[in-house]
Image: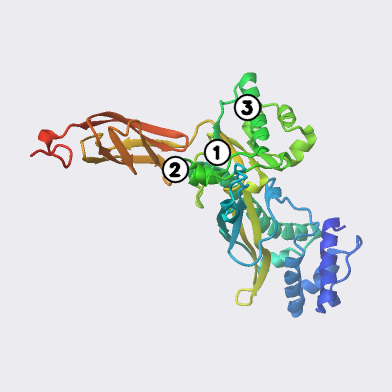
Amino acid sequence: MPPKGLVTALNKMREMSVQDGSVYHQYIPYITEDTTISEFAQPLTDDNLDIVRNEFFGLLKRIVFTSIETRLFNNPLNFLEGEELPLGWAGENIHVDPAKPNQFDGEDFAGLLQKYEARIATEYLAVNSDLQYAVTVTRDKARSAFTSWATLEEFISGIINSLFNGAYITRWKQTKALISSAYQQGVVRVETVSAVTNEATANAFVEKARYLNRMFTMPSTNYSGWNKKYASDDTKLKITTWCDSSDIVVVLRADYESKIDVMALSRAFNMEYADFIASRVVIVDNFDEYADDGTKIFNGDDIIGLIADRRWFKIRTQYFNMTEFFNAKNLTYQYFLNDTRMCRFSLFANACVLALDNPDTISISGTATCAEDATSTLTATTYPVSATVTWKSSDETIATVEAGVVTGVSAGKATITAINGNASASVEFTVTAKANGGGGQSGASD
């Protein structure tokens, strides 16, 4: 007796043949529980009926989503994907900030003609993943597939599993990598938490999650990647963001999920436990990143999870389809699954990585002394390397600093500080008096 899912798929192929007006249905019987494999396979194994066999492999591509029993990987992060992406490689995401209030002035007649521009920020998100998965079916494999219903089902499932599991697992890894990439690039808020080792640290973790859940729903400049990347030290460029509590999702590492009270975490989000687990929290294995050859290129042990507005994930599929090709030279059937999509994160949505350590680091090197009216250049080494460094002097009557170049103003000592996100480094800078009243570079004399 053929499996029920296989019967559904094979009869669907026959229906497609009728609709297409092809010859396949003229030779292949309608499958019932009494149909034998030999009755079904005879036309497909007859060398005089190559056209029927070729149409079978062509129709097979079109029914891969039907109810054949397979072990497809169910990507739990796929609910974060948005609508399909139309043709084109880039999309524009625009944020319009809330208007700022002005003090009412009944005598301000000139203000009627003043221009009040909305504060607008724009990010461009492009398609960044264009992958193809392939599997080859040889003539011998094709013939052996028709020896029993079990081998036929295994044959079809093998094709589907190979192609679609490859794509779904890659999608799973790409979505996790958004979190580790944002962490490494320093474009997401990071809150440090203690390792969960006992009830007290577990409760502290839940309290932190509850706090972030509350704060995300309130207008704030603290949780967008835009402010961290472009406006960390410029309030004029900061944007205000917030989101509904129903849009907040949690991505959590499995080893931490096993240590905390997820029921308590669901209460922190004012949700029933079952609903919270089903729709708001996703458990992942780790946040490591690997190269194509399997080499680990980032150790994500410091990242515990992410709490974010689901709009932080900008994942949209442009093309996801199978094609097939028959190679008459070597009598093989080639199947290709093409997956083109955008997998990015947005700087305009609230997000916070919960981690054991903050990745922002900075150090200063260079000569920390110069004479009055002379300069000395300090160099800041940062992680992430693309970080924007802000420089400050504790006393600008002694020394000023701009882009790492320190200018001596008067003799004395000042603290020069370089800031990278949540990290900073400082050196004590000494300005010496001019030698014999001379000027120029440090150490120069008449």
Q: CA distance from mark 3 to mark 2?
A: 26 Å
Does 58 sit left or right of 368 as displayed? right
Quadrant housing residue 445: top left
**Given the image, on which type of amino acid does mark 3 rest?**
Phe
* Residue position for label 2: 384
Q: Where, quadrant-wise, is the N terminus in this rendering?
A: bottom right
Q: Position of residue 359 (x, y in %)?
A: 47, 37
Residue drawn at 73 percent across, 31 percent down: 266
234 up-or-down from 32: above or below: above
Whichever of callouts 3 and 2 sits on the residue coming sooner in the sequence is 3
| Residue 205's disc number | 3
Q: Can residue 3 be seen in the rendering of this structure?
A: no
Q: Can residue 327 be seen in the rendering of this structure?
A: yes
Q: Position of residue 65 (x, y in %)?
A: 76, 59
| Residue 189's disc number | 1
| SS assignment at label 2 | loop
